[in-house]
Amino acid sequence: MWITHVEISNDKTEEKLKMVEYNVKSEHAAEFIHDGEVRATLEYAAAHRNDVALVDEILSKAAEHKGLTHREAAVLMECDREEQVARLFELAREIKQRIYGNRIVMFAPLYLSNYCINGCVYCPYHAKNRTIPRRKLSQEEIRREVIALQDMGHKRLALETGEHPIQSPIEYVLESIDTIYSIHHRNGAIRRVNVNIAATTVENYRLLRDAGIGTYILFEETYDRATYEQLHPTGPKSDWAYHTEAMDRAMEGGIDDVGIGALFGLTNYRYDLVGLLMHAEHLEARFGVGPHTISVPRIRPADDIDPADFPNAVTDEVFRRIVAVLRLAVPYTGMIVSTRESARSRELVLDVGVSQISGGSRTSVGGYAEGVEDADRSAQFDISDTRSLDEIVAWLLELGYVPSFCTACYREGRTGDRFMMLAKSGKIGNCCGPNALMTLKEYLEDYASPHTRSLGVDVIARELKMIPSDKVRDITERRLGEISLGQRDFRF
């Protein structure tokens, strides 16, 4: 084990961390995201970056589809030998294809409120920002937003809100979830609501579980505690330990699908890559199941936020390597890239690891319904990929992917370790593949343009032949026909 003594100094406080040991199973953030272990890992990776025998050994281990340790992943991130780097990307593609096939899960964010009491310096929602219009959706406004999203074809949402005990208490979030699930417009329905709200208590996580949420999502932003405390000078989020231990409380509250992430560009990307993997290892060690998803956003322009103020920007080349290394390290974990990224950037990472993307997104409060005053000015960040959902679906189909609107595992109780067992056993092809085709067929029938529909019909015919089980294939083919006749919501 590595032992460290770190001094942190920022505008808010001067704190000396006590001597602590790295302990992957610890309940304490400073022990499972251990600064000394991270830095020792980075030193080790730099020293062994071109140790060909070691790198080849790590790549051979990755080829077994059983994952890598954070230290092994750090070595691959540092390696600059052309042959080994090429093998890294090749393996990432192989693993992505073996586990996920051609499926890409679709979702959209839904912003409920941008009131916030935190002082995060990279986010325009911070409490001192006097230029951004503050908005909170009423339940009727939420209905309009959800109907607009349903009319696009979305079935899965990620609910977002700023942290504010008066404007966005847990009661408001729970009421909003009930509203979202209650709306059935034409053939539309939101079948899974993932929730991205501030770190909270075990009791509140139990309430979210009982409300039927899908995945609880919370980004660490940066795992470097010194940087974290500089970037979060005020508000509840400034408590690094409470924030970092949120996923433990969520799992204690019965939520077994959790999603972690880092905002790359806030600090050294190598540190945050190692931190992400240490967090995943901790959840696996303590609860028996790692994160359901990992998100990899990059810093973007927004109201009163200039990315030039953050000197640790991540290039497209480095970004693609991060995604590939993550895919080797956590092969069965979903990986998410949002519309923060351009179409070109998203295409570069789809084949080496990404399994979920957003489409037709708005990052403003009230951004989906027509005629909402000042909606664009309330955005959390600028969107790079501004295409409509139909345009993105067509693009994915042209690239050979299967846009999936599936929410079956969540509704069939295949969450947490039950989903991981299905994925690791290789049986996922007889479940997720058919579900993806049936939900794509629903989209084609109800929402697609003629061009997109034509592309989708061809992809479904191709993918139907690839379902391993003859019985499942026959059932899927029959259900696809029934969808054409107006039936909806089949699932395995």
Image (cartoon, rainbow, N blue to C red):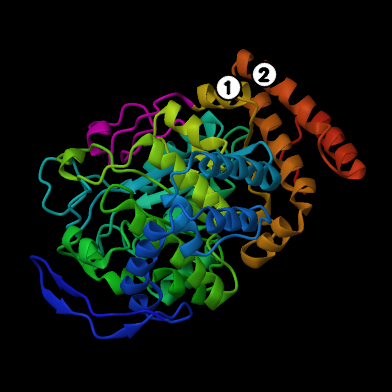
Please tell me which residue lies in front, 327 or 28. 327
Residue closest to the far bottom? 19
Q: Is residue 86 above or below residue 287?
A: above
* Structural crowding at the residue carrying mark 1, measured as other residues with C-alpha within 10 Å and reported as few (<14), some (14–19) or many (≥20): many
Q: Relative to 298, is 425 on the left or the right? A: right
Residue at the far top: name it: 451
Residue name at image x 76 percent, y 31 percent: 463
Q: Position of residue 490 (x, y in %)?
A: 75, 43
The amino acid at mark 2 is Leu
Point out the stretch of residues depicted in magenta: 359-388
The front one of 485 and 80 is: 80
Residue 220 in picture, x, y percent from top left: 35, 60
Query: What residue did someone put label 1 on?
Result: 394
Q: Main secondary structure of the magenta part?
A: loop
Give the x, y percent position of residue 338. Answer: 43, 39
Please tell me which residue is depicted at 55% across the width and 71% down the height of the picture: 284
Position of 121 with respect to 428 (left or right) is left
- Marks 2 and 1 close (CB-CB < 8 Å): yes
Above or below for 446 versus 176 = above
Residue at (32, 67) in percent of width and height: 39
Q: Of 164 and 218, which appears nearest the observer?
A: 218
Q: Secondary structure at mark 2?
A: helix
Is residue 143 in view from this perspective?
Answer: no
- Residue designated by label 2: 455
Q: Which quadrant would residue 289 be assigned to in this image?
A: bottom right
Is residue 370 part of the magenta span, yes or no?
Answer: yes
Three-letter residue code for mark 1: Ala
**Is residue 306 a member of the stretch shown in magenta?**
no
Question: Local crowd at mark 2 within 10 Å, few (<14), some, or many (≥20)?
Answer: some
